[in-house]
Image (spheres, helix red, strand yellow):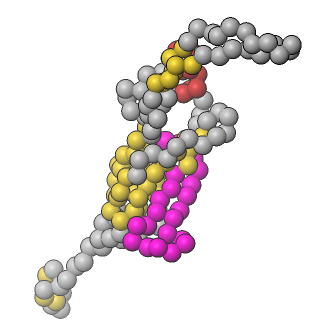
Amino acid sequence: PNATYTVSAMALSASGEWGFWSTPSEVKTLQLLQMEVLYLGEDFAQLQWHRPLETIVAPEMSAFHEVPLEYHLRVTDVDDSSAGACQEWETAEHRYDVTGLAPGRQYKVEVRQRSREAAWGQWSSRTHVYTLDPVVVTMARIGEDNVTP
């Protein structure tokens, strides 16, 4: 990710002879998607992802970004080592509301993008989120017609 390469090519003719090298072109791979946590609750996380703003796209590649893309989101419960600790979803949106999480737990979240050629890209850097602990209310005094927390 985010690396620059110099690319040249040459053609092989039907007679088995190689042609001349093409003019070298520089290409730069995209940066990894970045995860952002919009909201957290006791049992949910609202997530959003994007490419960094400094990712520069050549004009001839801009059509790639106009095509609806597919994303693969993975959320893993760090505090649970069972097989069900990892949940995965595919979505065309660049944000997702993950529900059904356990309160007071740590999760790692990551996302990747599918290309037009249907190949999955690399996973984003892991982002750790912590769901909120449940609110505990204790009563200091209970009367016939009132309660004092």
Q: In this view, does 90 lie to the left or right of 104?
A: right
Residue at 44% over, 73% down? 80
Residue at 43% over, 22% down? 56
Q: Is residue 22 left or right of residue 135?
A: right
Find residue 19 and report its image quarter.
Answer: top right
Q: Does the magenta stretch include residue 91?
A: yes
Q: Residue furthest bottom?
A: 144
Indicate the position of residue 144 as horizontal and vertical percent values. 17, 91
The reply to whether residue 8 is in sight is yes
The reply to whether residue 43 is in sight is no
Indicate the position of residue 140 as horizontal and vertical percent values. 13, 86
Q: Is residue 7 magenta?
A: no
Residue at 68% over, 8% down? 20
Residue at 60% over, 16% down? 8
Image quadrant holding the C terminus, namely bottom left
Q: Is residue 112 left or right of residue 53?
A: right
- Taking depth in this image into account, of 92 and 84 the one nearest to the observer is 84
The residue segment tinted magenta is: 73-95
Q: In this view, does 31 lie to the left or right of 16?
A: left
Find residue 101 and report its image quarter.
Answer: bottom left
- Taking depth in this image into account, of 83 and 46 the one nearest to the observer is 83
Indicate the position of residue 79 as horizontal and vertical percent values. 39, 71
- Taking depth in this image into account, of 80 and 133 the one nearest to the observer is 80
Seen in the picture, residue 115 relative to 61 is either above or below; the reply is below
- Taking depth in this image into account, of 2 and 65 the one nearest to the observer is 2
Indicate the position of residue 42 as horizontal and vertical percent values. 35, 67
